Image: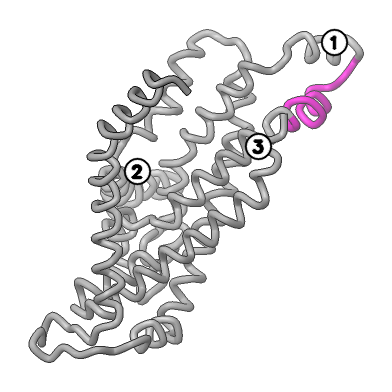
Amino acid sequence: MSEVARESRRAGRLTASPAILLLLVWMIVPLAMTLYFSTQNYVLLDPDNRSFAGLENFSYFLSSDSFLNSLWVTLKLVGSVLAITVVLGVLISVLVDAQFPGQGVVRMMLISPFFIMPTVSALVWKNLLMNPVSGLFAWLFQLVGLTPINWFSDWPLLSVVTIVSWEWLPFAILIFVTSLQSMDQEQKEAAQMDGATPVSVFRYLTLPHLARPIAVVVMVEAIFLLNIFAEIFTTTSGGPGDATTNVPYLVYTQALLEFDVGTASAGGLVAVVLANVVAAVLLKVFGKSLTQA
């Protein structure tokens, strides 16, 4: 390596080092503080009575019925949203991939909910659509002689799943539509000339072509859906009871409603480990297919 190349590489490292150092501090300091508080008996209502707890906070959090329930709610929420967004995303993408007047406008309208903030989406669904007195769904039910449903009391988890699916369906459509545009149209036309039905084209050409985009959507959505909080906080506050309390909301209740910083920190670390486990499993399942040519 020439002296000029060494100097250039050294200068690159020097200029990048402040940003790398700042990023490390930004990541490590909160993690170190969370790790420290997770080993402390620290309740904000009695801050002076603070002592070393070891692993008691982890044991308490992991063995509580609330954690097991929140884990189950998280799995149901993530699994339901993934199933809805992938299935509907594929079907809608195939429909809007066909040429028709106003195709661009329709695509833009389908994608637009993805750019709305989660809190705003939750408020719109809660107050304008699912309100049992003045909501759009209540008006439609009354129009056909049915009793309006109190969604957030009678079907709380379904309501949250509906809102979150509405937010993430545009992301799936965006990925699938982009992928369909790179599909070999000559192969598709040849299959149609040979008498292949639309179902056969979808089954043997379109679906295999969408295998990779589906893996990408599942991986990205799963990681973000494990951290769903704003929709639950805005609509159900984890209830009724703990019907919609997922792991992030349980950590929030420990920290800011019960003021138990130690247990909340332990719960936060447990949530981080769970997210990494899920990410590792997804990479194991889908990573190989994504790297294949």
Spot occupied by residue 233 in the image (x, y as percentages of width and height): 28, 60
Amino acid type, mark 2: Leu
Q: Is 94 on the left or on the right of 114, as rendered? A: right
Q: Secondary structure at mark 3?
A: helix
Q: Which mark is residue 239?
A: none
Q: Nearer the viewer, residue 148 or 106?
A: 106
Question: Sequence-wise, which precedes: disc 3 or disc 1?
Answer: 1
Q: Nearer the viewer, residue 139 or 178?
A: 178
Which quadrant is home to the C terminus?
Answer: top right
Q: State how far apart marks 3 and 1 are (Cα).
A: 27 Å
On whether residue 45 falls in the magenta region, the answer is: no
Q: Which residue is mark 3?
A: 290
Q: Which residue is mark 2?
A: 136
Q: What's the magenta region? A: 195-208
Q: Which mark is residue 190?
A: 1
In the image, what residue occupies the spot 33% across and 30% down?
10
Spot occupied by residue 187 in the image (x, y as percentages of width and height): 80, 13
- Mark 2 or 1: the one toward you: 1
Is residue 35 placed above or below 144 in the rendered structure?
A: below
Q: State how far apart marks 2 and 1 are (Cα).
A: 46 Å
Q: Is 145 on the left or on the right of 285, as rendered? A: left
Say whether residue 239 is visible.
Answer: no
> Residue 204 is drawn in which quadrant?
top right
Is residue 191 placed above or below 93 in the rendered structure?
A: above
In the image, what residue occupies the spot 66% across and 34% down?
212
Amino acid type, mark 1: Ala
> Residue 90 is drawn in which quadrant?
top right
- Mark 3 or 1: the one toward you: 3
